[in-house]
Each structure stands twice: as structure tokens, then as C-alpha cells.
Image (cartoon, grey):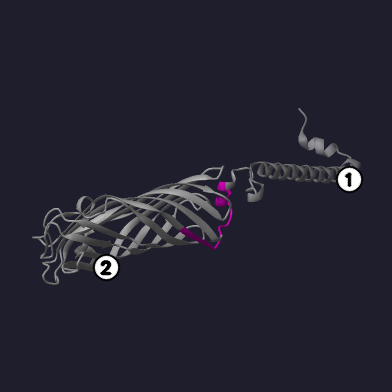
Amino acid sequence: MTDPSNTCATLSPDSMRVFPAALMASLVCLLAVNAAAQDVTADTAQNDSAEVSYEWPDPSESHIAPKYKATLETPPVVEWTLSAELGFLAVAHHIIQLSNDGSRFDYRENGGQDVLFPFFRLSTDLKFKGRHTVVFLYQPLNLKGETVLSEEVVFDGVVFPAGTPLNSTYGFPFWRISYLYDFLRRRGDEVALGVSLQIRDATIVFTSADGTLRASRRDVGPVPAIKFRGRWGFENGVWWGTEIDGFYAPVSVINGSDEEITGAILDASLRVGYDFNKRVSGFFNVRYLGGGAVGTQSDPTPPSDGYTKNWLSFLTFSLGIDFRAVQ
């Protein structure tokens, strides 16, 4: 074997001068190769990142259906809609009793409410940022009947003998304000839930045709309710929708009074419509309007003892129009 020390000893002076230069050249080559490898790695990472990145398309360039583009777009700050309905009302069932010793009176069978009555309602919506809607509604309701009594009836202690020509007025117009939250926020469609506050303005009058006998009740008060509204549109402009306001509860729980009266309302509709353009829609609507109250008032006006039992079921059929004044 050769002794390493002897090998080093045999290196010539020229070899010793060349060795440092070769070593330096080798280091430079290694550094160059390492830098190139890092550049390749960076380029590969950048290309991989470019392959997995995704940019949302501009809504105007999206190929999804137009009705769904609203979920990508910023909704209008305010939308304002005016609505009106016109049609007729049919009484399916309507009974009333005034005072504990009063008669149970059937308006449809004995009070002249077996005919059709004119019906209309007006409402307006303000929708904010595609989610929040405030609805204001006015619903007139005034039913008049004329009949000749086949048997004696008693209202609040006033006796109307058999054979009396009787005129009756049942007025129950109301104003309603509602708040809705739309879970879809999509133009043309709606799934919204909220609350309503209704102000009733009831007038109940029974009068003999000659004016010698009269019994009447009047009442104004708040009625809260839960509200639901839905609408679903199709690409051809046809749509269907529903709107429901309802509650059932003791009045004393609502307003903290001592009056043991239980009340209920249900205003439920189903409609089919067509969008003529972006501003005007027409629809046909079928509505059930029902409710009533039973109980005793704490401070009745004599000769009444304050007891009331009043339940009604109405059906309405109407044509309506929606006009989007601001959108």
C-alpha cells in the first residue's frame, strides 16, 4: 500500500498551484447548479398554484339561469312594489252570539249573507338589500244583509220578534303591518318568514227596518300574527305564490288584560301569476279568511254582559296586479 504522506510528498510545486484553482471552479459549479435547481422548483410551485387557483366568473358572463344571478350580484338597496286585488267574497260559515242569554245567529242562513260581496285589498312592499321587507296592507270588509226573521232572536238583551224585517251590518276592516326576512335573496323567488301586527276595527249592528230596535257592538284592538310568504318563478314568466298570516291565542296573554277572550285569525292565499315585464305582474288569487273570538269583556256596556262568540270562514276569488315602482 502507498503511504498517503508519501503521495502528498510526491506532488510537484506546479500541481500544488493548480489544485486551489480547480477547487474554486468546482465550488462555483456547485453553486450554479443549486441556484438552477431552486429556480426550477419555484417555477414548478408557481405552475401548480396556477393550476389549482379559481376565480369567480363575472355575473354578466355566467352561464347559469338569469334568475339565479341575483345570488352573485349586489341586490338593490331599495325595492318598492304596489299591489291591488279586486274580486268577490263568499261566506262559507258565519255565526255570532252576543251575551250569554243571546241567540246563536247564523248570518248565512238567517242574516242575508248567502250572496256574493265585492272584495278588494291594497298593499305596498318596501324591500331593503334583498332580504328585509316591510309590508303595509289595508283590507276593507263590510257585509250588509237584509232579511225577515223566521224566529225570535236576542242580541245583548234586545229582543227581535219573529217576522221582524232585519238589517244587519258586519264591518271588519283591518290594517296590517308586517316584517319579513327573505332566506333566498333571489329576484323572482322568495321564501320569507316574519311577524305581523293587525289593527281590527269591528262594527256589528242589528237594526229593525223601522228603526225601533237596535243592538250594536264596536271594538278596536291589536292582533299579532306569524307571517309566511313564498314565491317561485319559472323561465317563461309564470309563477306561483302563497301568503299566510295566522295566530291563535288568549287575548289576555297578548295584551295583559283581565278579559278572558280567546281569538284567532287565518289569512291564507294561493296565487298563480305571470310577469308581463320587469315592472308589471298579474295574478289570480284564492284566499281563505277566517277567525273570530269567544269570551267575556271585563267592562261591558249595559244591557250587554260582555260575552261574545263570533266565528267566520270566508273565501275570496280575485284578480290582482303588482307594479314595481322602484327596483
Nearest the viewer among 233 and 319 is 319
Q: CA distance from mark 2 to mark 1?
A: 112 Å
User: Which residue occupies 88% across, 43% down?
Assistant: 18
Identify residue for label 2: 221
Q: Earlier in the sequence, mark 2 or mark 1?
A: 1
The magenta segment: 67-83
Tell me which corner region of the image, top left, top right, bottom left or bottom right, holds residue 140.
bottom left
Please name whichever residue, 3 or 142, is drawn nearer the observer in this view of the structure.
142
Residue 58 visible in the displayed image? no
Amino acid carrying mark 1 in the image: Arg
Q: Position of residue 204 (x, y in %)?
A: 23, 64
Q: Determine if the magenta segment contains residue 71.
A: yes
Callout 1: 10 Å neighbours few (<14), some, many (20+)?
Answer: few
Q: Residue at x 73, y 44 (%)?
A: 43
User: What is the three-letter code of the residue carrying label 2?
Assistant: Gly
**Side (left or right) of 229 relative to 260:** right
- Quarter location, residue 170: bottom left
Which quarter shows the N terminus? Answer: top right
Find numbered disc 2 in the image and state the secondary structure of the residue it sits on.
strand
Q: Residue furthest left?
A: 101
- Other residues around mark 2 within 10 Å, as few (<14) / some (14–19) / many (≥20): few
Q: Is residue 227 left or right of residue 165?
A: right
Q: Is residue 84 magenta?
A: no
Give the image location of residue 41, x and y in percent.
71, 42
Q: Is 11 or 131 nearer to us in this picture?
A: 131
Q: Which mark is residue 17?
A: 1
